[in-house]
Structures are given as C-alpha cells and as structure tokens.
Image: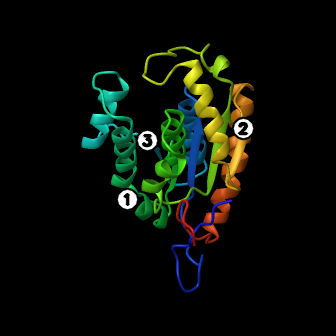
Amino acid sequence: MEKKSMLSSGLSGAEPRGALIVVEGLDRSGKSTQCAKLLSFLEGLGHPTELWRFPDRETSVGQMISAYLSNKSQLDDHTIHLLFSANRWEKRSLMEEKLKTGTTLIVDRYSYSGVAFSSAKGLGVDWCKAPEIGLLAPDSVLYLDISPERAAERGGYGDERYERVEFQSKVADFYQTLRDSSWKIIDAGETMEEVEKKIQQVVLDQVKECTSGKPLSLLWSSS
C-alpha cells in the first residue's frame, strides 16, 4: 500500500473540509451518470458540491487532449500521458482551495485513469505515476466494476480512441494494481438504482469524516 503524506501541520485534521471523491472505471461503466446523480444527492442534502471531469477539455491543454481523443491529432504516447497529467496539475491549487473552504468535489476520472491507460499502451507504471506525485489523494475512489464486453454493449461505445474491448481489458488489469485502502469496488452490472445507493453510503461516510477534520494527503508520496 502506498504511503500518503499529510498536508496539514500542527493540530493535524483540526479543520473541517470538503471530501475528494474520485469515480473510476472502464469506458461506458456508468461513471458520468452516477457522478451526476451523486451531485444531485449531495446538493439535496445541503452539502456544497461540485462535479469535475478529467480531462478538463476547456483548458488549453485540455483542448489538445480532446483533439487527440477524437482522433483529430496524433501524439507520442509519452507526450499525451504528460498532457493528461498537466491537465490535472492545472486544477491542483483550485482543488485544494475548494476542499479547504468546505466544498466536496466529485471527480470523474483522475490519476488512476492516466496510469492505467498509459500502462496499457506499454509505458512503465512507475514512469506513469511519477508526474502524478504531489497531486491531492482522494478520500475515496469508487471503482465501477464492469467487464469490457458488457461495457461494449452500451450506447455510444467506440466513439473515442480507447474504446476497444481488447485495450479496455488491459486497462482493467492495470487498474487492479493501483488499488489501495481508499478504493471501494462497486458492481456496475447491477441496476442503476442499486449502484446509486451503494455510492451514496460510501460518500456520506467520507463527507462526515472530512467535516470532522480528516487531513488532506498527497497521492503516491513516499512519506
């Protein structure tokens, strides 16, 4: 298990904050749908909440990534990996600010996607992790577990570069190597309502912990 260094000092964890919730999974696993439902649920309970997605295609770096994903440009595998990482770093300071001022962030894809997808293309896992070190660590990673074959049956599959069953199978294997104690595996093959209910329970527990002063920590730090 990876160690995570704490950001707070002194009375560690004394300040209430928002929770950092990351939703991961293969393409067409239902992430976007469940993220939207979770946003409505938390807002309905009065929790300040925002939904973020990576890549953020609105930034200058994100626009380069978007062109690549829609097969409008060609980039070296190392280059696109670093662009994905840079896209997360673009939002790093704002992310910390939002959390510390009490806003819970639901994040559709994060560093785990970056490492899993690039590793599936043949890049070394440690090399892929390196530019992510120092980003904020999630309080909980909700992994929507579904087979690549079943995901391929869902509408819109194949529209983007990586939506191929054989490649998604490799991605799934690398996701397994990235699991740590923050991960919660959700069976994405269940009904939408069942998945939604399981996610809500996990997230409410995390929101409560963070409101009580759980300290922020850094992703994949050694100390």
Image coords of residue 64 (percent x, y): 27, 35
Q: Residues within 10 Å of mark 2 (few under 14, many from 20)?
A: some
Query: How far apart, in angstroms, are the residues tagged by discs 1 and 3?
Result: 14 Å
Mark 1 or 2 closer to N-term? 1
The N terminus - image quarter: bottom right
**Residue that mark 3 sits on:** 54
User: Does the residue at mark 1 contact the one at mark 2 (Cβ under 8 Å)?
Assistant: no
The secondary element bearing badge 1 is classed as helix
- Asked if residue 11 is positioned above or below residue 204 in the image, the reply reads below
Residue at mark 1: 94
Kind of residue sitting beneath label 1 = Leu
Q: Amino acid at mark 2?
A: Ile
Q: CA distance from mark 3 to mark 2?
A: 20 Å
Spot occupied by residue 35 in the image (x, y as percentages of width and height): 56, 38
* Circles 3 and 2 in contact, beta carbons < 8 Å: no
Point 43% across, 22% down: residue: 161
Label whose residue precedes the other's in the sequence (3 or 2): 3
